[in-house]
Image: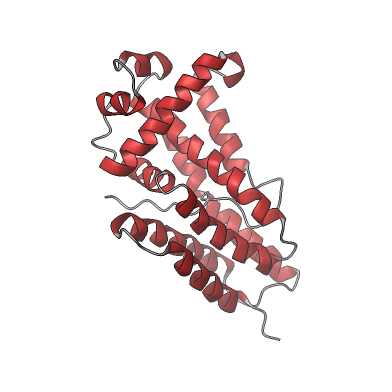
Amino acid sequence: MKHQQLAYPNRLLLGQANTRTVLLMEARNGAAKQGATAPASRTFTEAGRRAQIVQAAIEVIAEMGYAKASFTRIAKRAGLSSTGMISYHFSGKDDLMREVVIEVLRVADEYMRPRLEAQSTGPGRLRAYIEANIAVLEEFPQHLPAVVEVLGNVRRDDASMGELCALMESVVDMHAQLFREGQERGEFGEFDPRVMAVALRGSIDAVVNRAVREPGFDAAVYGRELADLFDRATRRTT
């Protein structure tokens, strides 16, 4: 498996409400620019069928990997009689994979947002962010591994997927800025905000990859330890 850095959103942000869903919004906008049918123009039946196909794709990718996630396997998992139904709703595999990423962003955002909004301080949001990322992995065990596979294998020369990957990569810059702002408010100690942001993202990504490789891996315990570690690393000592 190719390793693709992933931390959320999973990339959901540590604090500001106006930026927390930026990836999801921009990903949807990017899809629209590529000519995907706008959600408002789909019938209830069409929307339901697309969701069914996307969920089947998530399951197949998580279990078998990106390379083996053929339309035939996805159609079988979705209970469809042929791959033609997938081709009707999606222009190709890249289009479907983009929707997989967007769906995982949506699920993660809905799960993590209330946990982050319940916290009023930088350290509180940092802990909630780490623990919520791990909780998403436990609550939706196929979603994050599927995105790891997709982002590690998609063609970057595809305009829409390249744009989406670039958006995902920009999260470390946003995290660094939020660490910096927390320092200015006196909530965090002295450290290089970007180094800490990179360490945060890499640590959460490592949990996802380990959970994929090790059945029975206790992600909740790992998440609490990781939150304690970053609390000590970022804590103001004077």
The residue drawn where x is 60% and y is 35% is 25
Residue 157 visible in the shown view = no
Q: Quadrant of residue 69?
A: top left
Q: Nearer the viewer, residue 33 or 25?
A: 25
In percent of width and height, residue 88 lies at 39, 13
Name the residue rendered at 49%, 63% in the picture.
Answer: 198
215 above or below 94? below
Residue 103 at x, y percent in the picture: 50, 35
> Vertically, is 76 above or below 84?
below
Question: Which image quadrant is residue 210 in?
Answer: bottom left
Q: Looking at the rendering, which quadrant does residue 94 occupy?
A: top left
Q: Nearer the viewer, residue 164 or 114?
A: 114
User: In screen coordinates, is 133 left or right of 63?
Assistant: right
The location of residue 2, given as percent across then percent down, is 29, 50
User: Would residue 185 appear left or right of 172 to someone viewing this image?
Assistant: right
Residue 144 image position (x, y, % from top left):
43, 47
Residue, far bottom = 238
Q: Can residue 185 be seen here? A: yes
Pick the residue in front: 33 or 64.
64
